[in-house]
Structures are given as C-alpha cells and as structure tokens.
C-alpha cells in the first residue's frame, strides 16, 4: 500500500536526530519502506546522502525505492569520458550524475528500479539483500531463473545481467544500492554507454560490460509497479514490519533539512566532472582542408576536470607553430568541457589573422579539438 508522506505521519513515524529543526528519523519499530515521488537523479541521490548522514539505523533499517528520468550514473572513482558518450547525451537531454558509492556505470530510466538498503555498518550484508530481491521476483513469477553472482550482480537465465550493485560504508552506517531492469530503453542504454573518445589513459575504475535483458521480456506481468510492491512485501516480511510504502518528496526541507543543498552539490560541475581521477588524452585528428590532408597530434593532461597541460603538433605547412602554441597555452587552467572550450575558441578566432586559408584551418582545428571533450 502506498501512503503519502505528510507532516502528520512524519511525526508519528519519525523523529529528528543530528539536525536542528523538524526532520526525519525512524521510530517505527523494525524499519521503514520509502519511495520517492521524484524522478530527478540528483534529488534521489541526495536522499541517500541525507539518510546516511542523519539517521540512526540501529534496529531500524530502511528500504528506499526510486526511479529516474533518463540518466547515466557513474561511480565515485570513474571517468565519464571513458564510460559514456557525453556528446550524444547532451543531444538527447540525458543527465549525467556521479554517485557517492564506487562501482561501475549504469543507465537509469523509468523502466529501471533502484533499491537502496540502509543498515548499520554491522548489519551490512549485500548478498542477503540480493536474496531478498530474488525471493520477491519468484513470488511474482516462480519459474523465473535468477541467481546472484560472486560479483553481487543478478543474472537471469545464467547469462543476462538484470541488476548491478554498489555500496557505501560509513563510520556507523552503510548502504547497498542496486538496479533492477524491468523495461529499460535498450537503444538509449546501448548507445550512451559506449564511449567514442580515444586515447584516454587513466587509473579510474572501469566498468565491466555484460549482456543485459529486461525482466518484462520474460514475463509481461513483471512491471516496475508490480515488482516494487513485491519487493516491499518481502522486505516487510523479512523485518517483521507493515508493508506500507511511504511516499516522500525529496525536496521537502521540513522533512529533510538541508537536502536541497545536497542535491545542488551533486549536480555541480565540480562534483560530476571535477572529481574525475587525473587522466591524459593522447590522440590524433585527421583534418582535410582544400584537399590537403594532415594529421594533428594532441596531448592533454587533466586534473580535477581542468586542463593542466596541453600540446598540439601539426605539420609546418599546415599551421604556424606559434598559432598552435597560442591555442595550447590558452587551454591550460580551463575546464575540460565543450562549453568552456567554445567560449575560449570563439575569442581566439577573433584574433586570428585575416588570411582566409589560415582562418579556415584554425577554425577546423578548433572544432575538431572540441569533439574530444
């Protein structure tokens, strides 16, 4: 049963801890089942942060159910340029988010369920959570062949990945979250989780690619709504609590004091891109101008999402070295991103010599350089 979350039942079920004003803490014996009314990735990740930072979970675990509009979510220690097609995502309006937990990159949309299991650090057990999910799936469809792997994924029919796992362990609390593919858009998933960027060298965590499949392909009764109800019922039975799902608004500061600031931090460039582990790009660009073909070599070092060093080499007959050096120098200290590079390049083009051939070559080079960002 879905129950709208109001201030009245807020104080019936929950009380404050670690926050100075009206807030949320679990007093319901045995735990709670929460579901977000938002489909915004940054707001939902902020709920995870808030519960992890402010709730006393001793004897009172929480299951959080949430879904998002189309989004690519990378792990805390990953490089987005290695993991996804950022340019295509911009064209399609697909968000990019970096979560607090480790692990690999996943694609979210409304056909995917996200489950977050909050416990104390001592009660943290990812395999038990996955077994709970399997029991819930089999309660809906007993013939469904789903198994948990040593990597803590869920496999359908022994080969198709339907769920991936990540986690965060704090000083006293922990959470384990996982995905569950019900009816995800395969075309978007396969296209945006394929990086077109070449020559990246990094120590960032790399995703492990797997065969995937939607549960709905096996049984058309396995909808997101049916599965969330079943998982909630299994969780309630396991923890001996009522199976009511409490709907929460992740933007409500009266319930979650300070949560909107957390959401703002999670969607900031400094977090999504600036937290990328240091990396370098060594690549070549093939340029054609007036039937003249040239190979341009580019080396860029990036730290905290900003260009730390840059060198561009081209044949002497193509562009004067002083023009290449000017471009390289101006990039240093700027964000490794297309929007900032566009502003910088437009300013540089206004200073370009009036020579039509030089201008067209430099313009072509600048446009090509932007494609690697």
Image: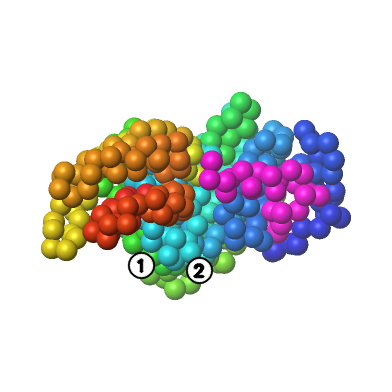
Q: Relative to 192, is 298 on the left or the right? A: left
Query: Where is mark 1, residue-wise?
Result: 187
Per the image, is 321 magenta? no
User: Badge 1, how many Cα within 10 Å: few under 14, some, many 20+?
Assistant: few
252 vs 31, nearest the viewer: 252
Image coordinates for residue 50, horizontal then vertical, percent: 67, 42
Residue placed under numbered mark 2 in the picture: 223
Is residue 253 a member of the stretch shown in magenta? yes
Q: Which of 341 and 20 is in front in this view?
A: 341
The answer to whether 204 is drawn above or below residue 72 in the figure is above
Q: Is residue 128 above or below residue 194?
A: above
Between discs 2 and 1, the one toward the N terminus: 1
Relative to residue 341, is residue 323 drawn left or right?
left
Magenta residues, start to end: 244-271
Q: Position of residue 319 (x, y in %)?
A: 22, 48
- The answer to whether residue 184 is above or below residue 267 is below
Extreme residue in the bottom direction: 220
- Judge from the rendering whether residue 317 lies leftward or rightward of residue 306; answer left or right: left
User: Residue at position x 85%, y 48% from top?
Assistant: 11
**Residue 200 in the image: x percent, y percent?**
29, 41
């Amino acid at each position: 049963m879905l129950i709208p979350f109001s201030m009245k039942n807020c104080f019936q079920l929950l009380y404050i801890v670690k926050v100075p004003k009206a807030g949320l803490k679990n007093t319901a014996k045995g735990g709670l089942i929460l579901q977000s009314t938002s489909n915004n990735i940054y707001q939902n990740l902020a709920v995870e942060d808030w519960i992890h930072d402010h709730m006393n979970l001793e004897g009172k675990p929480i299951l959080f159910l949430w879904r998002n509009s189309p989004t690519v979510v990378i792990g805390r220690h990953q490089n987005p340029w290695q993991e996804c097609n950022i340019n295509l995502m911009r064209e399609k309006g697909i968000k990019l988010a970096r979560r607090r937990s480790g692990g690999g990159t996943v694609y979210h949309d409304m056909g995917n369920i996200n489950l977050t299991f909050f416990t104390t650090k001592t009660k943290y057990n990812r395999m038990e959570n996955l077994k709970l999910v399997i029991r819930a799936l089999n309660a809906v469809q007993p013939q469904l062949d789903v198994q948990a792997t040593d990597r803590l994924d869920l496999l359908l029919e022994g080969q198709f990945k339907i769920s991936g796992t990540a986690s965060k362990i704090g000083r006293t609390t922990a959470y384990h979250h996982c995905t569950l593919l019900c009816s995800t858009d395969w075309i978007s998933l396969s296209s945006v989780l394929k990086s077109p960027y070449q020559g990246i060298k990094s120590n960032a965590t790399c995703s492990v690619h797997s065969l995937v499949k939607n549960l709905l392909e096996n049984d058309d009764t396995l909808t997101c709504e049916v599965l969330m109800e079943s998982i909630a019922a299994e969780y309630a039975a396991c923890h001996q609590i009522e199976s009511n799902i409490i709907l929460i608004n992740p933007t409500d500061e009266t319930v979650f004091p300070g949560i909107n600031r957390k959401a703002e931090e999670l969607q900031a460039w400094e977090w999504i891109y600036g937290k990328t582990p240091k990396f370098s790009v060594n690549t070549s660009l093939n340029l054609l101008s007036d039937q003249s073909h040239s190979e341009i070599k580019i080396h860029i070092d990036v730290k905290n999402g900003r260009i730390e060093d840059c060198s561009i080499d081209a044949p002497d007959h193509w562009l004067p070295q002083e023009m290449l050096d000017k471009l390289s120098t101006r990039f240093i200290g700027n964000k490794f991103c297309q929007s900032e590079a566009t502003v910088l390049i437009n300013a540089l083009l206004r200073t370009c010599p009036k020579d039509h051939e030089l201008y067209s070559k430099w313009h072509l080079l600048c446009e090509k350089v932007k494609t690697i960002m």
